[in-house]
Amino acid sequence: MNQKILSLLSILLLGGSSSSFAAVTLPYLIGDGMVVQRDEPVRLWGKAEPSEEIRAFSTAGKKSVASAIADSSGNWSLTLPKFPVGGPYQILINDIVINDVLSGDVFLCSGQSNMELPVYRVTDMFADEIASYENNKIREFKVPQVTSFHGPLENTSEAYWKSCNRENVMDFSALAYFFAKQLNSTTGVPVGIINSSWGGTPVESWTCETTMEQWPETVAKKRIYEDDGYRDRSKTLEGENYYRWNNRLYADDPGLKSSAPWFAQATSDDDWEEVDLIASRWGIDNERGTKEPVNGSHWLRKHISLSAPQSKGDAVLRMGCIEGADSAYVNGVFVGTVGYQYPPRIYRIPDGTLKEGDNIVTVRVISQSGEPKCVPEKPYKLILADGEEISLEGNWKHHIGARMPQGPNMIFWHYTPVVLYDAMINPLFNYPVSGVVWYQGESNVSNRYLYPDMLSAMIADWRKGFGRDNLPFYIVELADFLHPSDVGGRNAWSEMRAAQALVAEKVPSAWLIKNSDLGEWNDIHPLDKKTLGNRVAEAVLNNMKK
């Protein structure tokens, strides 16, 4: 403990009634490295023994002293005067020392997967920029993903503030990262990001129960699942269903139980059907002529001839995006797997795996529902050690492995109304923020006609919780998505964007951030989060000037 804190501790002890303190606990949001909102009193709260005196002091100013008495339940709260912009400062709360506190602009960044999408998922486009940038003035607190079916929580699960450095940055929200980077570069002010997001979640999950009662069917859905035992049994049964389905899949797959497995280099594929990796519909039942999707396993193999120099060193296998799960092998060596559609397939091939002459890339695709396929206009290539790229598009060999019934249904409790508001938003309300960046809506396209009222109601809930009727909301427009031939789907997404725009038009202090032009028809998670982040920063800066 440094000399300055020792001095502060002496001041507190001399001003107290005793020379020792009972145990005081703080919410995870209040801790080392936190960023507090400039121009706002610094709120501190937590738990202690009933009637315990809580005294706080900071290095942010001579008069930064406050005290409180824990109530009969042990709850306490107090406020310190606002901190000057910058830092780092220290805060002493009884015998707890909080180090490296900055004062700047704090934003709550929330929504579904396009907000959650981490920095490592956009390195295809921004790898060099990300690798060359570190900034201790940018920090993120990532709220753990939990649900609450029994009312609002007072604290998040265990989490800590993390600085924007090479050790941490890959797990930052990509949108929040680029937004904070642009904002800080313009203002010079520290930026704190509270990332509370979860993929696939509808707006109903983020709204309080009292508000959702105007849509009684949504509250009924939540109450159906409030029994913890029921939910536990449901997930246990789901796990057993998946175990049995996968056990049967692996037992029946001739590509695995053969004495010469189909990923082995020595296995012949002479009698396999020839398909075009992208253009052919190899995932349907051409063999029986039904044209129905074949659930189970599909095997794909491609032969590549390499020279001796080309075969040297580490390489990378890029298998674009596959609708299904996959496992990839090169010359019989397993190089990687991805369990669902959206992540890019980027598999490292260790030195010594490739060889002079014929090389075989094998991909085993698992489909539980729908038609498995390789998504067009994604990178399918072999990247050699010297940077040479060999395209893997075109002709492959295909063979159906195990035929299976449709896979079991999955339960996503975090899609349930109210449960994320109570677990991941309510614990944040004591912490002042400058505004909210909201990127969500893909999961509400099906009930888009209700969305303007639902999002407006959610905004009102959050503003009430933070105690600011005009808390700025920056609503990110849905990116363009779906193939031009999908007229119905594209019209639905267009109507959803109109619903978002209506909220921004009618709700005071709400702004729509243009994003439709940054979309990719074949990817619900477009990569260009930098341009979008810059646009959010521009909107925030314009609002600050008012």
Image: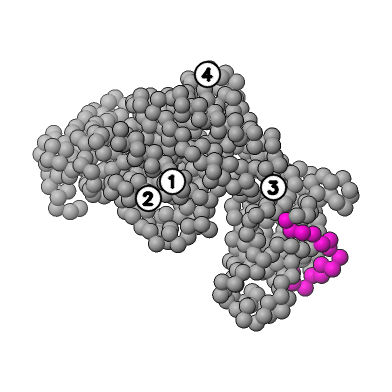
Q: Identify residue type, mark 1.
A: Gly
Badge 2 vs badge 1, beta-carbon distance below 8 Å: yes
Crowd rating for badge 2 (residues with CA inside 10 Å; few <14, some 14–19, many 20+): many
Q: Earlier in the sequence, mark 1 or mark 3?
A: 3
Residue pictured at 42% horizontal, 41% vertical: 536
Q: Earlier in the sequence, mark 3 or mark 2?
A: 2
- Classify 233 as above or below 325: above
Residue pictured at 21% horizontal, 40% vertical: 83
Q: Earlier in the sequence, mark 2 or mark 1?
A: 2
Disc ID at residue 243: 3
- Classify 420 as above or below 469: below
Q: Which span of residues is magenta-colored? A: 264-278
Q: Quadrant of the C terminus?
A: top left
3D distance between C-alphas at marks 1 and 3: 41 Å
3D distance between C-alphas at marks 4 and 3: 38 Å
375 left or right of 90 in image: right
- Residue 115 drawn at (x, y percent): 49, 42
Q: Which residue is mark 1?
A: 533
Badge 1 vs badge 3, beta-carbon distance below 8 Å: no
Specify the principal SS of the magenta part.
Answer: loop
Q: Earlier in the sequence, mark 2 or mark 4?
A: 2
- Residue 459 drawn at (x, y percent): 44, 27
Q: Identify residue type, mark 2.
A: Lys
- Residue 312 drawn at (x, y percent): 60, 78
Q: Which residue is mark 2?
A: 181
Q: Identify residue type, mark 4.
A: Glu
